Image: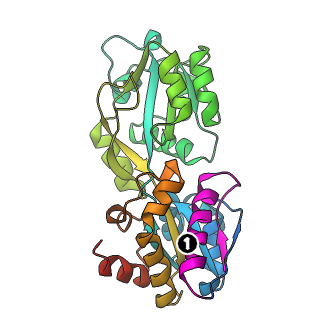
Amino acid sequence: MTAYAGSVGGLYMEVMSVWISDWETKIDGLNISAVSGGGTTNPFHISRGAPNEAIGITDTITTADAMEGTGDIGKRAPDGLKNLRALVRFNALSHSAFMIRGSALPDGVTTVGELLDEKPSLRWAFFQRGNPGELTARRFLEAYGVSIEDLNDWGGSVSYNPQAEHSSLMIDGHVDVSMVMTRAPAAFMLDMDASVRDLVWLKIEEDIVDKVIDSYGGYIKVDHPAEFYDSLEEPFVTASVDHVLFVHEDMDEELAYQLTKSVLENASNMRNALKSMSEFYPEEVCHDTGRFPLHEGAERACSELGYL
């Protein structure tokens, strides 16, 4: 079997390596090779491969694009990739957030909507083009009735940067607003929190969060945790993204069952192996798998173990 993960050293490859070790130990005759992949390419490999010979990882946004033929998936598969099914979710959420330097904040503004109503001339930083965080930023702006072009037309500027650069740009005063989607806590966010003395987190109006979730799918509505950052006084509602282990819908039920059962029964191995998976609890991971329904084998494993 081929396991389509991500870049070496990245979350997908690290997680897949732990699971492969457990699977090859627990499931007789199973040999798995992990290969580099990506969130938007892995669905194509699984959809077009032999059902019992491939397994992959993607994010919950991409599950919606795959099922509906939208986004980057839709450019290559307008009818979608509807033959994909989930085994489990990571429960390693990346949260959407907008932060602004206090010196650039108009008086009385506490939310993203209030800021946009001011049509301010500000320097905005987003993640790289095509990144789920950048895509989500555009979707939030659209939900507010604003475009990237508007930010420029108001006299501001827009840049697209890797997440590690967001902290240095804010710390050095090169940007005014940073929109991120990342896990909490994140090292670059801790740097920003400690170094930007007037950092302000803008709340996202709940109706806008609901609009983004209802319009696009693949997002999970949660409260952004506040306990990690001194500059964040209280949690706020946001749209978050997770990651999903998935297979072809025609994978043998027994194989999908054994794969899922092993993942669930050895969840503590994952939590102990990777700090990024510290919230991988079986009672959470059988739910909210984006737009991919659970494979029938995964559903059986989750039900038998009491997690559905």
In-image side of 34 versus 289 (left or right): right
Q: Which of 43 and 25 is in front in this view?
A: 25
Query: Is any part of residue 78 visible from this angle?
Result: no
Query: Is any part of residue 269 visible from this angle?
Result: yes
Q: Nearer the viewer, residue 257 or 139?
A: 257
Instruction: Determine the secondary structure under disc 1.
Output: helix
Residue identified by numbered label 1: 22
Q: Residue at x 44, y 80 (%)?
A: 295
Residue 58 placement (x, y as % from top left) = 55, 62
Residue 32 placement (x, y as % from top left) = 67, 77
Residue 12 placement (x, y as % from top left) = 60, 58
Q: Is residue 18 magenta?
A: yes
Instruction: Assign the N terminus to one quadrant of the image.
Output: bottom right
Callout 1 crowding tier (Cα within 10 Å): few <14, some 14–19, many ≥20: some
Q: Is residue 279 above or below residue 44?
A: above
In-image side of 232 versus 266 (left or right): left
Q: Which of 296 and 119 is in front in this view?
A: 296
Q: In this view, does 114 lie above or below 54?
A: above
Q: Which residue is drawn at 64% across and 83% down?
A: 53
Q: Residue at x 43, y 42 (%)?
A: 95
In-image side of 4 versus 93 (left or right): right
Occupied quadrant, residue 40? bottom right
Q: Is residue 110 magenta?
A: no
Q: In this view, does 211 lie above or below 100?
A: below
Instruction: Assign the C terminus to one quadrant of the image.
Output: bottom left
Which three-letter amino acid code belongs to the residue tagged 1? Asp
Q: What range of the chain is rendered magenta? A: 1-28
Occupied quadrant, residue 166? top right
Residue 92 placement (x, y as % from top left) = 45, 52
